[in-house]
Amino acid sequence: MQALLSSLTGIVLRLLPLLLMAVVAGSTFWLVQINTQQEGTTAPIVRKHEPDYYMERFSATELAQDGSTKMRFTGDKMVHFGDDQTYEVARPAMRAYQPERPPVTARADRGRMNAEGSVIDLYGNGFIERQKGADAAKDPLMTAASEYFQVLVNDDIVKTDKAVKLTRGPSVMTANGLIFNNVTREVQLLGNVRGTIITGAPTRTPGS
């Protein structure tokens, strides 16, 4: 009996390292499986659309290569959102200056600007004004009013797909949309265009 116990003890001692290796290997496999399942079920982190900083009563100026003012952008408050790098602006106002061309002003109740500052959307009581040129008869004051405008800063274009009222001197037009190119000074009215166009000075009857 003692000889049998001695023999079994010897076998167990010889197999003990193998048993320990098997236990370690099994534990490692189990941990890998648990971690893999957790990684597979973990949802990606989604950043919330929350402001990360803001500015009040701000004024930003873009200069041309010669140091002159190219554009000035102001507002009551600007809020930055970190998830999409956009800006929301309360009471935005912009004024663009170009050599030998009348300044153009745009304003609204609120605005939204992309990260590059190249696209600005204006909402609520949007108003665009281009001052009269050197020859007011040929280049009179022009205004446009709508509940929405989109300003393409790099292209110097203002457009809208909402109802718009356009005035050019004494002429008044309404339409369902507008594209204004300040570079070429072309205005394109879109859909259901109505109004009155007055050209030249009004005629007078003799004796009046």
Image (cartoon, grey):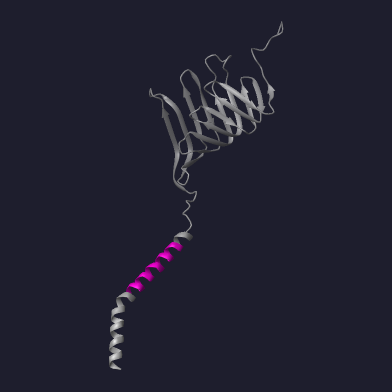
Residue at x 55%, y 26% (from the top left corner) = 129
Q: In this view, does 101 lie above or below 29?
A: above
Magenta range is 20-37
Quarter of the image where one finds residue 165 = top right
Q: In this view, does 79 lie to the left or right of 173?
A: left
In the picture as drawn, the residue positioned furthest to the top comes out as: 206
Majority SS type along the magenta span = helix
Residue name at image x 59 percent, y 23 percent: 187
Q: Does the magenta stretch include residue 66?
A: no
Q: Which residue is drawn at 52% across and 25% down?
A: 104
Quarter of the figure with residue 17: bottom left
Quadrant for the N terminus in the image? bottom left
Task: Find residue 33 and report its horizontal and vertical position in percent.
Answer: 43, 65
Name above or below for residue 5 compared with residue 44. Answer: below
Quadrant position of residue 15:
bottom left
Foreground pick, 65 / 93: 65
Spot occupied by residue 106 in the image (x, y as percentages of width and height): 53, 30
**In the image, is residue 88 above or below residue 1?**
above
Instruction: State the image coordinates of residue 12 (x, y, percent, origin top left).
Output: 31, 82
Q: Position of residue 185 (x, y in %)?
A: 55, 21
